[in-house]
Amino acid sequence: MALEGVFQQSLKCEIPKLQAAHTRIKQHLRGHDLQDVDACIAALEDELKRQQFEADFRTFAKQVEIVLPDPAANPFLADLKALGKVVIGCRNRYRDEQLDIVGCGEKVRALIEEHVRATGVDPRVPPTKLFDVEFEQVLAAQTNDRAKASEVEHAIKAHLKVRLDDDPEYYQSLSLRLEEIIQKYQNKWAELVQQLLLFRVGMEGEKTQQNEDLGLSDTEGAFYRSLMAEISKASGDNAMDDATHQRVLDLTKELVSEFQGATQIVGFFDKWDEVARIKKQIKRSILDQPFGDKALVDAVIVRFMDLGKRHFR
């Protein structure tokens, strides 16, 4: 059999696979117009649904890539482009790094990127961050209040995720408050947009104000909140008097100062003897306090070493 005949025979085997992959990917958005990108993005808000959609989209894109440039692929190209735009829209809306068209094949990626650019969107530009100057423009470009609410919600969640390890107690508290707002204004999209924007305005300034009121730097504030959380766990519901609270503040400043000094050593966190020394200092400082005990020491050492790597590495 001639080489061309072998290719055609192989192609005949691939076309049914393409048809099956096309049917499967469209099931994810059954009942939705693929040209209504906002509706399709909203339908994929659940993370598990997005994962399944992404897996089936890649299979579909791979089959189109195999069949192209044969005309047998042409009936599937309009849906490929529309679905590719949905993939990019979901990546940007939900800040979902798994959703991308980079691995879909050169021919497929070129088609999708050309289609998305024609609609005024650069497919290679990463999602706009919560405090980027362009964020207001991205928000204004959304076609309805539900889409705007979703944009703000997921930009906030992405910001909290990135900042969580900087100050776990503070950003966990913001995450809980965010969920309360979302639940309270569920399906009241215009009100939710306003509440989320108010939340956005105050979220970083509130932390700065807390730290200033306590006389702490931003770094000291993160250590203080972690230390307070562990003391509260250890002491249960027992109220902390002013003298004890002042001890906690002084202890925080002392230990952060120790960290700042110790981590001037190059490669500090890779030197077991230096790490052991700072752990010993944390242990001694806590056990010197009236609220200090071994369980608290163990918990605080873990928390402080994680924070130290984040702030002083």
Image (tube, grey):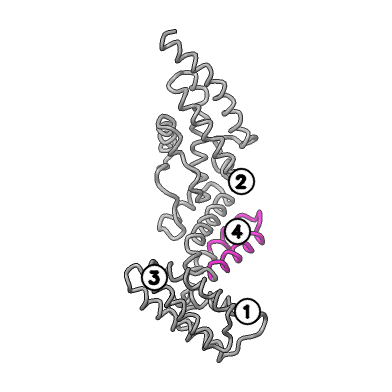
In terms of sequence position, does the residue under pointer 1 or pointer 3 come before the other? 1
Q: Residue furthest bottom?
A: 243
The crowd level at tag 1 (other Cα within 10 Å; few <14, some 14-19, many 20+) is some
Which of pointers 2 and 1 indicates the residue nearer the eye?
Answer: 1
In terms of sequence position, does the residue under pointer 3 or pointer 4 come before the other? 4
In terms of sequence position, does the residue under pointer 4 or pointer 1 come before the other? 4
User: Which label is found at residue 192?
Assistant: 4
Q: Position of residue 22 (x, y in %)?
A: 57, 28
Which of pointers 4 and 1 indicates the residue nearer the eye?
Answer: 1
In terms of sequence position, does the residue under pointer 4 or pointer 2 come before the other? 2
Horizontal side of 69 relative to 76 (left or right) equals: left
Which of pointers 4 and 2 indicates the residue nearer the eye?
Answer: 2
What is the spatial separation of the Cα atoms under label 4 and label 1, in whole angstroms? Answer: 38 Å
According to the picture, the residue beneath numbered tag 2 turns out to be: 48
Comparing 210 with 219, the one in front is 219
* Residue type at the position of mark 1: Ala
What is the spatial separation of the Cα atoms under label 1 and label 3, in whole angstroms? Answer: 27 Å
Q: Position of residue 43 (x, y in %)?
A: 61, 43
Q: Are marks 4 and 2 in contact (CB under 8 Å)?
A: no
According to the picture, the residue beneath numbered tag 3 turns out to be: 312
In magenta, the rendered stretch is: 170-197
* Residue type at the position of mark 4: Leu
Q: Is residue 194 above or below residue 11?
A: below
What is the spatial separation of the Cα atoms under label 3 and label 4, in whole angstroms? Answer: 38 Å
Residue 173 lies within the magenta run: yes
- Image quarter where the N terminus lies is top left
Residue 78 lies within the magenta run: no
What is the spatial separation of the Cα atoms under label 4 and label 2, in whole angstroms? Answer: 24 Å
